[in-house]
Amino acid sequence: MPVKLRPYSIGGYSVHQYIFTPDAALGAAISSGDQQGNVYVSGPTDEWVARIVSHCETAPLTTAATFEIEYASTATGSAFEDLDVISIWTPITHSTNFFVHTAGQKTVIADSGFNTTTLPSRRALRFNVNAAGGTPAQNVTVIMEVWRPLQ
């Protein structure tokens, strides 16, 4: 009898997506700042960062927009999910310290070149806009795809 695989599974992993959006209203230009949009918590086991995709309905012009996804790396005790006690955040970086959304492009996809590939379990995740781009981007969505081991 053939083995039935779970949907969206790759080998011994399931695919999960974290979807980040800045604080800007729909149709408004984004602005720089830390901890924008939703805060998430990583899964029950370490996850592997496979891909980051950014979409800008209105692309940044003249200069790139730069984004950063960070996880809690130092907290009081072991409360890595508690925003009140997290003291240090570690970026999930791609070639530079930030994920760069090139000026003039509506979609940018990165599926290699990550300096941080392992996302520790049960860590708060936050989204930062480091630079909005010259003539800032609008209607931005950044998706981080991770592979989580099946249990």
Image (tube, grey):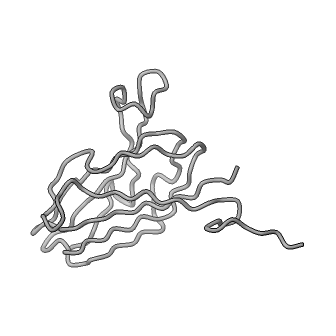
55 vs 108, nearest the viewer: 55
Tally of numbered tags = 0
Seen in the picture, residue 9 relative to 38 is either above or below; the reply is: below
Residue 29 left/right relative to 2: left
Where residue 58 appears, as percent x and y from the top left, is 19, 75
Estimate the x, y position of residue 109 in percent, counting from the top left.
39, 72
Relative vertical location of residue 122 with respect to residue 145 in this rendering, above or below:
above
For this orientation, the residue located farthest to the left is: 135
- What residue appears at the point 31 percent right and 71 percent down from the top-left corner? 55
Q: Which residue extends farthest right? A: 1
Q: Is residue 113 left or right of residue 67?
A: right
Asked which quadrant contains residue 110, the reply is bottom left
Q: Which residue is at the front of the view, 101 or 141?
A: 141
Q: Residue at x 58, y 46 (%)?
A: 46
**Measuring 48% from the left and 66% from the top, which residue is drawn there?**
112
Q: Quadrant of the N terminus?
A: bottom right
Residue 126: percent from left, percent from top: 34, 46
The answer to which image quadrant residue 131 occupies is bottom left
- Residue at the top extreme of this rendering: 77
> Picture coordinates of residue 82 (x, y %)?
40, 30
Query: Is 108 situated left or right of 134 in this image?
Result: right
Q: Nearer the viewer, residue 98 or 23?
A: 23
